[in-house]
Image (spheres, helix red, strand yellow):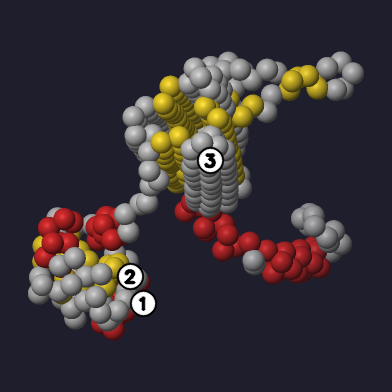
Amino acid sequence: MKLRELADRLGCRLDGDGDIEIVRVAGIQDAEPGDVTFLANPKYDAALAATRASAVLLRDEAPAAPCATLRTGDPYLAFARAVGLFAPAWRPAPGVHPLAAVAAGAGVGDHVSIGAFVAVGEDARIGENTVVFPNVTIGAGARIGRDCVIHSNVAIRERVVIGDRVVLQNGVVVGSDGYGFVRRGDGTHEKIPQIASVVIEDDVELGANTTVDRPAVGETRIRRGTKIDNLVQIGHGVSVGRNVLMAAQVGIAGSTDIADDVIFGGQVGVGGHLTIGRGSVAVGQSGVTNSLPPGAMVAGYPAIDSHEWRRASVVFKRLPELKRRIEELEARLAALTGQAAVPGEPAE
């Protein structure tokens, strides 16, 4: 693709030779002639001077580069779109594989692709242009929208509702039973039937081996535009807002309400029956045990304001030294007052 065409398709301002032939997108340190790279993080400013790329995506206000430039307000977004231009997603041809099992009462839209060993239950519905890769199970009464991509080994349980343009990565389970039991008088546990619904709205992506549980009553819902990484657990009755981001290994306990634009770093744990305010951020490995107001940024366990956590974490490694100094001061105070110091207790 000519650099001029790439600039037009990305909506960038071109500085340099538009006739340069671009063949791929590459990282700034690995780029070769014929590549377009990008610079969005100042950490890599020094690497720009040495790059061998034929062109670079830069912010509008960034200094000149040693190669042709594509100027844009968001180089990272332009990079993401460039990757899509040079590596379009492959999709199988429409049709139902002869080794798939589609119930007679199921509905399959136009241009749908259903791979080998897919099982589609009675009264399930699959919207047009959706791709279902091999070894997927779609339960009875499930509803899947148009333009979805369902990767191999996904399980979509009965009556689950999935919107349009949803991507489910390998091994996702949607609609598994929530973790609900009642202790009997003899100490054993009776299962609470988990029979309510799960709704995944439009433009959601769920990472590999993520699980979304159904509740006994009400619903579990993930709202439009939310992107969830691998190995995330969404408990029964959880409500997730729009455009939420969750990194890998996040766990959300049941009946928690998460507002729009929330961000959870990797391995964040969130307790049950909490309310997480709009735009809140929990740093990786935080343990959220209380509700958060809108715009909060927390870290640590139990999670507190991230600035306070950083200040406290600096002190942690000094605790043995501080303990020793306190004991020395207690001993000196005891000597001055003529009383014996008791280790770990203040002198009187």
Which mark is drawn over residue 26?
A: 2
Residue 71 in view: no
Q: Quote the CA–CA distance across marks 1 and 2.
A: 6 Å
Badge 1, how many Cα within 10 Å: few under 14, some, many 20+? few
Q: Secondary structure at mark 2?
A: loop
| Three-letter code, disc 3 | Ala
| Picture residue at 86% right of the left edge, 15% below the top | 185
Work out whether residue 246 or residue 320 is closer to the camera in this orientation and state it: 246
Q: Amino acid at mark 2?
A: Ala
- Rounded to the nearest angstrom, the CA distance separating label 2 from label 3 is 35 Å
The local secondary structure at tag 3 comes to: loop
Which residue occupies 15% across, 68% down?
3
Which one is in front in this view, the residue at disc 2 or the one at disc 3? 3
Q: Which mark is residue 116?
A: 3
Q: Looking at the figure, which quarter contains the N terminus?
A: bottom left
Q: Quote the CA–CA distance across marks 1 and 3.
A: 39 Å
* SS assignment at label 1: loop
Query: Which residue was labeled with disc 1?
Result: 30
- Circles 1 and 2: CB distance less than 8 Å? yes
- In the rendered image, the vertical position of residue 323 relative to residue 256, given as above or below: below
**Image marks 2 and 3: residues in contact by CB distance under 8 Å:** no
Mark found first going from the N terminus, 2 or 3: 2
Which quarter of the picture shows residue 7? bottom left
Residue at point 21%, 70% (across, down): 22
Q: Which disc is residue 134 wearing?
A: none
What is the residue that sits farthest to the right in this orientation?
186
Position of the C terminus, as image quadrant, is bottom right
- Which image quarter: residue 36? bottom left
Residue 302 visible here: yes
* In the foreground, 278 or 162: 162
